Amino acid sequence: MATRTAAERREEERRRYNAYVATCPSRKLLDTLGDKWVSLVLTALAGGPLRYSELARTIAGVSQKMLTQTLRTMERDGLVSRTVTPSVPVRVDYRLTPLGEDLIPLLEAIKRWAETHMEDVEAARAAYDRRLRPEP
Amino acid sequence: MATRTAAERREEERRRYNAYVATCPSRKLLDTLGDKWVSLVLTALAGGPLRYSELARTIAGVSQKMLTQTLRTMERDGLVSRTVTPSVPVRVDYRLTPLGEDLIPLLEAIKRWAETHMEDVEAARAAYDRRLRPEP
DNA sequence: CGGGATCCGAGCCGATACTG
DNA sequence: CAGTATCGGCTCGGATCCCG
């Protein structure tokens, strides 16, 4: 075991590449956007600020844990701002920052592509599956 | 326990909402794009067709399992086409379909946003973290 | 009302070994 | 060369309980 094995070198290589990819801006953006709830929160807040409970009702499928977690990350990323009003029951409002608003057009570009092309994808899937199971 | 509990109703609600969201074209697109390897394969193939091993070398960080799995899904979605040449060692080429090529401009729009704004995100993160740990 | 803390099951992913 | 099959670690996310 004088030098490293092939497996060790490959793993090292992979780690370096992954570290490199992690610095790629596009990948970072896709990581946040790919998160299931981020885009939903973004569109929900596009119409104006909302309270925590309003968000929870708008995005009915989310658990409080994931909603809170998503909002924290988005706040950390500078996409939303959080305002606490210390009334008798606490009131917390979330709104898009300018940076977050900047993301909306991009999200709409994605939406446009999806609406024009996703049925082609569906058709391709159906055709692919049919080829695998010709007739049950 | 005559009627359903509140928990049961909430879960039902959540399931319905999730099913609804699952039909949203944008979310489907974001699901595929958000996949770590899809965008990398897309950009790798944007320059022209590549063999399996060439892809594996280009995207050095991917395991064969994930590469194969990604390529299968993308083939199923009609984004790439797979051509087998039955030579002595088998040769398999992957290339973008027209649908897959259509995705490239969108990917570049994402890249542009990322390159112009992601450092703002980084700065926001740094500021956020600094606020939590003022000075060690 | 708006969370934090904890537990736990399901699925993802890498490593490894085998095949046509 | 281009995969398939299998196993095991590890993270994600939901459920639950508790707090200011």
Image: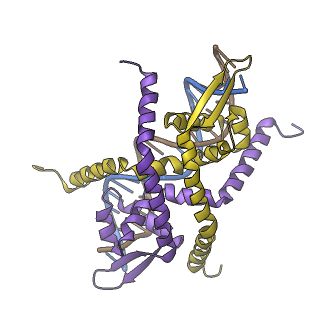
Chain colours: A purple, B yellow, C brown, D blue
Q: Quadrant of the N terminus of chain A?
A: top right
Instruction: Name which quarter of the figure residue A96 lies in.
Output: bottom left
Image point (61%, 45%), residue name: B42
- Taking the image as drawn, is residue A26 in sight? yes
Image point (64%, 23%), residue name: B84
Q: Position of residue A28 (x, y in %)?
A: 59, 59
Q: Position of residue A34 (x, y in %)?
A: 50, 54
Instruction: State the residue lying farthest toward the right.
Output: A2
In the foreground, B116 or C15: B116
Q: Quadrant of the C terminus of chain A?
A: top left
In the foreground, B32 or A14: B32
Q: In the rendered view, would you say B62 is above or below A129? A: below
In the foreground, B134 or B76: B76
Image point (36%, 62%), residue name: A64
Q: Position of residue A12 (x, y in %)?
A: 76, 46
Tell me: B1 left or right of A3: left
Tell me: B119 left or right of A79: right
Q: Position of residue A121 (x, y in %)?
A: 45, 40
